[in-house]
Image (cartoon, rainbow, N blue to C red):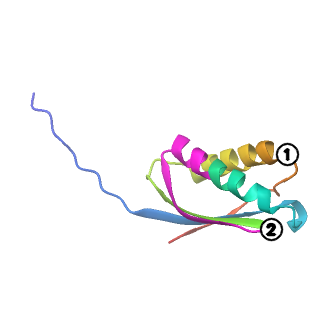
Amino acid sequence: MQQKNWHKAFELYAHITWRTRWSERAVAKQHVDVIAQSALRSAERHNMRVLAQAVLTDHVHVLVSFRPDSALSSFIRDAKSESSRRTVTVNWGRGYYAGSV
């Protein structure tokens, strides 16, 4: 039996944001790198690529490229959880926004 090579191509992008609990300005300057690195590590674990990100005092923006079989919700849950544990004082609110680009 002849084996076929299937080429898979995709270009899926999402703009994702999430806020601190009660939109508090809880993200200090020393937290920015920790939060950014947490998002990068989470993306790697979930087979995604972070193209851009911005960490502000009360929310985060992340632009990701992802595969069709990837779950954005798992990536976001992981990124929020790790960054909250590592910063200790930053608590994220429930939910997120995700829009296709």
Q: Amino acid at mark 1?
A: Val
Percent coordinates x, y for residue 29 in the rendering:
78, 62
Q: Which residues are magenta?
A: 39-56
Looking at the image, tell me whether mark 1 or mark 2 is earlier in sequence order: 2
Percent coordinates x, y for residue 73 in the rendering:
63, 51
Q: Secondary structure at mark 1?
A: loop
How many angstroms separate mark 1 from mark 2 (CA)? 15 Å
State the residue at coordinates (67%, 49%).
Answer: 79
Residue bearing mark 2: 57
Q: Residues within 10 Å of mark 1 (few under 14, many from 20)?
A: few
State the residue at coordinates (54%, 40%).
Answer: 45
Residue bearing mark 1: 88
Q: Amino acid at mark 2?
A: Thr
Q: Check residue 20 in the rendering and tell me which mark sits there, or answer none.
A: none
Nearest the eye: 96 or 2: 96
Nearest the eye: 69 or 64: 64
State the residue at coordinates (82%, 61%).
Answer: 28
Q: Residues within 10 Å of mark 2 (few under 14, many from 20)?
A: some
Q: Is residue 40 above or below residue 23?
A: above
Q: Residue furthest bottom?
A: 101
